[in-house]
Image (cartoon, rainbow, N blue to C red):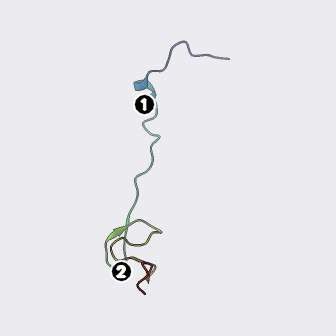
Amino acid sequence: MAVPKHKTSKSKKGKRRTHQKAASPNPTTCPECGEPRMPHHACPSCGKYKGRSVDGEE
């Protein structure tokens, strides 16, 4: 079994892992008010999700 002769430095390890990062969030626009919001979440500005109010004001 092959065993490394030298320790892999932090910079070498970081260079190898540059492409292993989380994707940035992709916000969509709210159909009610047009503000950006995360998909499958209630709108933080108007409080609606799928045309219904979820902040308890119905």
Please say if 13 is above or below 5. Answer: below
Q: Residue at x 45, y 47 (%)?
A: 22
Residue 12 point in image, percent of width and height: 43, 24
- Total number of numbered labels? 2
* Residue at x-position 43% and y-position 72%: 42
Please state which amino acid type lies under the numbered disc 2: Glu
Q: Position of residue 51 (x, y in %)?
A: 43, 82
Q: Quadrant of residue 53?
A: bottom left
Sort mark 1 into few (<14), some (14-19) or many (20+) by Cα contacts within 10 Å.
few
Counting residues from the start of the chain, the first of labels 2 and 1 encountered is: 1
Q: Is residue 2 left or right of residue 47?
A: right
Residue that label 2 marks? 32
- Residue at figure coordinates x 46%, y 31% from the top left: 16
The residue to which callout 1 is attached is 14
Which of the image's four quarters has the C terminus? bottom left
Position above or below: 19 against 43: above
